[in-house]
């Protein structure tokens, strides 16, 4: 079984093809300006807090407050669902490590917004299903097909997918 | 997209904070912003230290070095950060699978020969009669389809190039006696130009491959070699006619490059700095030139076409989609 990272959960909800490529280290992020932007936000927005804690080499948490709240910083709310599940996954992993996490917070510093995220029991079941699906996808020999969504045009994999 | 810097001056290349500073012998300083640099070409004689090399590695900048005569010496190719173990294994497997290797090699040569054909067609349409040579090349291209080994393909390629080069005396309006391709040392202006321009294309391809997870040493058409990044040679083959040779024709026919841009040294002829500069300016312009890409529905630069070629190879290597070589479509 391969370790599942937060980004993989995120990509599962964004695009399963991207998840497959990413998992095989065919990575495009270095070419994308959006990611550069993400980094900048990361470096400038919350420098007072503890940040970027790598847990179990699996998840990279933006920062923790008293080990009770996990923050995840995002640029826009476009892929909200994906971001929420990423955070729910973090909560789950940490709870399994006996860290008493209360909740997560999604931060949108550019929008001056934040949203609280919880993981309910029924969602936990859903999450297990998702993790199984992720394993299934990344074990495939071929990547899932192109999804042909409008946001493909902004995706860093666009040229790879559509050429 | 990152920038390319060409440095002709002799002097020192140093790291200073977050930028790279070139100080010429006369004391002129120039800042190269490391954040936006992708490649640096060194044509002059430059002193540099490991502090600089460490810095450019960190920034993923490739350093291409040319000697005084304009011959490519090599590249400082920073530690790969884009590695995919999975893709590497697949790339080797594809190379090792005779059938697949032959299919990819064929596709590369078909594309490059077609692009050669298109160059001839262009000049044929402009009053230079090249019908016969076009016909001959066309029939050789058809033979590529039936090639049974890499050697056979290479032989056909050699013949195509021979016919192609035989037309250059009529395409080029300057009076240059260009008989056949002589590499080392180049014995006339055109050979000297071809050598220089081919090495530019080679380095550009290398820089583009660097941005992907492909391994530059494992190739399909050329035998993986120890002296060269042979995958660069494969991909360069496709773009020489479009980027390199069209430029050579145009530079000579517009008299932008003339005999005055060359120096003769006993038995060979090489480009002066003036010539190299003019070529690089034009080369850079061409790499940035864009065309509307029909599959992608967006404008892409000639340089980016090279990257797209890498992506297509990746998809073939993975087994997702068979590779088709880039053919000039406009
Ligand atoms: S371009 Fe579209 S299909 Fe390709 S990875 Fe991005 S979102 Fe997925």
Image: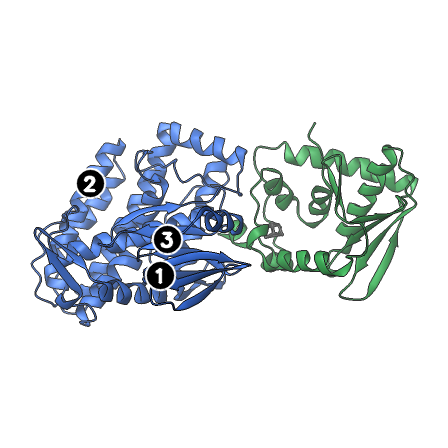
Q: Give the spatial CA distance, label 2 vs label 3.
A: 45 Å
Q: Which mark is residue B47?
A: 3
The local crowd at label 1, few if under 14, some if 14 to 19, many if 20 or more residues have their Cα within 10 Å, is: some
Q: Nearer the viewer, mark 1 or mark 2?
A: 1
User: Which residue is the site of mark 1?
Assistant: B7
The colour chain B appears in is blue
The mark nearer the N terminus, 2 or 3, is 3
Residue B252 position within the rendered picture, expressed as x and y whole percent measured from the top left: 18, 67
Give the quarter of the figure containing the C terminus of chain B: bottom left
| Chain letter for the green part | A
Report which quarter residue B281 is drawn in: bottom left
Mark 2 lies on a secondary structure that is helix
Q: Is residue B1 visible?
A: no
Q: Is residue A122 above or below residue B69?
A: above
Residue B69 position within the rendered picture, expressed as x and y whole percent measured from the top left: 22, 54
Q: Chain of mark 1?
A: B
Can marks 1 and 2 be said to lie on one chain? yes
Q: Give the spatial CA distance, label 1 vs label 2.
A: 39 Å
User: Which residue is the site of mark 2?
Assistant: B156
Q: Please say if the residues under marks 3 and 1 sit with CB atoms less than 8 Å apart.
A: no
| Left or right position of B267 against A125 | left
Q: Chain of mark 3?
A: B
Q: Give the spatial CA distance, label 3 vs label 1.
A: 12 Å
């Amino acid at each position: 079984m391969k370790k599942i990272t937060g980004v993989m959960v995120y990509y599962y909800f964004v695009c399963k093809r991207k998840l497959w490529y990413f998992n095989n280290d065919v990575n495009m992020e270095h070419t994308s300006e959006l990611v550069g932007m993400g980094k900048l936000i990361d470096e400038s927005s919350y420098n007072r807090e503890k940040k970027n804690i790598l847990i179990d080499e699996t998840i990279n948490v933006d920062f923790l407050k008293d080990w009770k709240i996990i923050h995840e910083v995002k640029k826009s709310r476009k892929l909200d669902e994906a971001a929420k599940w990423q955070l729910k996954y973090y909560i789950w992993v940490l709870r399994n490590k006996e860290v008493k996490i209360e909740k997560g917070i999604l931060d949108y510093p550019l929008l001056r917004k934040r949203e609280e995220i919880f993981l309910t029991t029924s969602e936990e079941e859903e999450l297990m299903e998702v993790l199984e699906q992720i394993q299934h996808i990344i074990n495939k020999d071929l990547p899932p097909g192109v999804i042909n969504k409008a946001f493909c045009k902004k995706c860093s994999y666009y040229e790879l997918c559509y050429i | 997209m990152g920038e390319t810097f060409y440095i002709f001056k002799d002097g020192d290349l140093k790291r200073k904070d977050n930028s790279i500073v070139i100080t010429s012998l006369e004391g002129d300083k120039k800042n190269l912003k490391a954040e936006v640099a992708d490649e640096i070409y060194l044509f002059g004689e430059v002193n540099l230290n490991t502090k600089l090399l460490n810095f450019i590695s960190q920034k993923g900048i490739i350093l291409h070095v040319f000697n005084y005569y304009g011959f490519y010496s090599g590249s400082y190719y920073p530690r790969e950060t884009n590695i995919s173990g999975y893709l590497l294994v697949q790339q080797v497997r594809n190379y090792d699978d005779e059938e697949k290797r032959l299919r990819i090699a064929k596709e590369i040569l078909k594309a490059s020969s077609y692009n050669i054909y298109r160059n001839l067609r262009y000049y044929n349409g402009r009053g230079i009669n090249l019908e016969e040579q076009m016909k001959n090349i066309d029939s050789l291209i058809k033979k590529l389809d039936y090639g049974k080994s890499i050697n056979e393909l290479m032989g056909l390629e050699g013949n195509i190039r021979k016919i192609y080069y035989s037309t250059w005396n009529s395409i080029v309006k300057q009076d240059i006696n260009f008989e056949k391709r002589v590499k080392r040392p180049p014995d006339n202006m055109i050979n000297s130009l071809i050598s220089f321009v081919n090495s530019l294309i080679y380095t550009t391809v290398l820089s583009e491959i660097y941005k992907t997870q492909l391994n530059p040493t494992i190739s399909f058409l050329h035998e993986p070699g120890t002296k060269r990044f042979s995958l660069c040679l494969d991909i360069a083959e496709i773009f020489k006619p479009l980027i390199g040779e069209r430029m050579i024709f145009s530079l000579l026919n517009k008299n932008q490059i003339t005999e005055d841009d060359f120096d003769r040294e006993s038995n060979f002829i090489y480009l002066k700095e003036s010539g190299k500069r003019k070529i690089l300016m034009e080369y850079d312009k061409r790499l940035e030139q864009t065309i509307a890409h029909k599959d992608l529905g967006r404008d892409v630069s000639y340089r980016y076409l090279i990257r797209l070629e890498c992506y297509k190879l990746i998809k073939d290597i993975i087994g997702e989609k068979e590779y088709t070589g880039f053919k000039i479509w406009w």
